[in-house]
Image: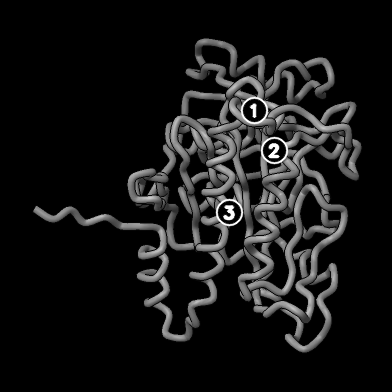
Amino acid sequence: MSIFVMTLARHIIEQERKFPQATGAFTKLISDIALAAKVISHHVNRAGLVDIIGSIDNQNVFGEQQQKLDVFANEALIRSLRFGGTLCAMASEENEDYIAISDEFPRGKYICVFDPLDGSSNIDVNVSIGTIFSIFRRTSPDESPVTKEDLLQPGYSQVAAGYVVYGSSTMLVYTTGTGVHGFTLDPSYGSFILSHPKIKTPRKGAIYSVNEGNYNLWDKNVQQYVNWAKRSESGMKSRYIGSLVADFHRNLLKGGIFLYPGDLKNAKGKLRLLYEANPLAFIIEQAGGRASNGKERIMNVQPMELHERTPLIIGSKDDVTVAEEFFQGKHQG
């Protein structure tokens, strides 16, 4: 009896066949990301056995303490993507400036931005962490030099987005605008295998995820929403891991809402628009949910800086709508 296995590579090729003009470059790009994810996953799983956990005596350009695994994951993605011939530029949350593909390497038409290791401070305590990525097509002429403006595209211009969660298993979830699909890394095959086809998030969930340690820093509208969510009549319960990818992944599958609002310390929020909010917004919308900054759709925001920050409300459609009403002072609970 034969068993049909749908691998990530085969799935992308089948999707690409629907577009006669496809060249195969996009398939190669996703394959390069998947290869880096396998390498990162291998080292995450061995983190307790090798000298790769903990911080290093260095901060990134934003004053954040870097973890050893941050540096490793960033280099793994850059190396995998630089030599692939599918990109003209990339940008990482860990690097101050974008990285243009130099003339010594083959260049393509795509741009990839990524958070190489979201939640990496949790690796020391064996909590799930992840990688987030977003892909755009270059809008300026191919023969012209790449500029920062090529990377500052709004979320609705994404051609693909995804994340990898390194947990009890390693799972890659991605969308190209035709639904959301999840693939689990099978060590026996050495491949990502389709395990969650056509993911749809519930219209209404029962989970709210927010760092309530920031309660006293929030404005009254945010406080009122959380106070309402705590009450039994809301039908909600608190679940917060503190790793964006892990919290988002759970809520995507089970329904619910993740919030990281602005506060007195971070008026513009803490999450990055390009590297975190936009790709997850693309995924949640394709799964039937919503993503907002409290005032407007996340993917309508025009980025002005590579590392621009934003408040984020993301999850099940009805839950995000209610939270927006509270944030805008239209709902008093």
Q: Which residue is found at the position 89% from the left and 26% from the top?
A: 264
Per the image, label 3 sits on a secondary structure element best described as helix
Dot 2 or dot 1, earlier in sequence = 2
Query: Which amino acid, mark 2?
Result: Leu
Where residue 33 sits, quadrant-wise, is: bottom right
The answer to whether the residue labelled 1 contacts the one labelled 3, judged by CB atoms less than 8 Å apart, is: no
Query: Which amino acid, mark 3?
Result: Ala
Q: Is residue 6 above or below residue 14?
A: above
Which residue corresponds to mark 2? 69
Where residue 272 sits, quadrant-wise, is: top right
Q: Is residue 280 above or below residue 256?
A: below
Dot 1 or dot 3, earlier in sequence = 3
Q: Which residue is found at the position 82% from the left and 32% from the top?
A: 56
Query: Which amino acid, mark 1?
Result: Ile
The answer to whether the residue labelled 2 contacts the one labelled 1, judged by CB atoms less than 8 Å apart, is: yes
Whole-number angstrom distance, CA of label 3 to CA of label 2: 13 Å
Residue 219 percent across, percent down from the top left: 82, 24
Q: Nearer the viewer, residue 291 or 279?
A: 279
Residue 123's disc is: 1
Which residue corresponds to mark 3? 36
* Other residues around mark 2 within 10 Å, as few (<14) / some (14–19) / many (≥20): many
- Is residue 253 rendered to the left or right of residue 317? left
Residue 192 percent across, percent down from the top left: 41, 51
Whole-number angstrom distance, CA of label 2 to CA of label 1: 8 Å
Q: Is residue 204 above or below residue 17?
A: above
Residue 137 percent across, percent down from the top left: 65, 73
Per the image, label 2 sits on a secondary structure element best described as helix
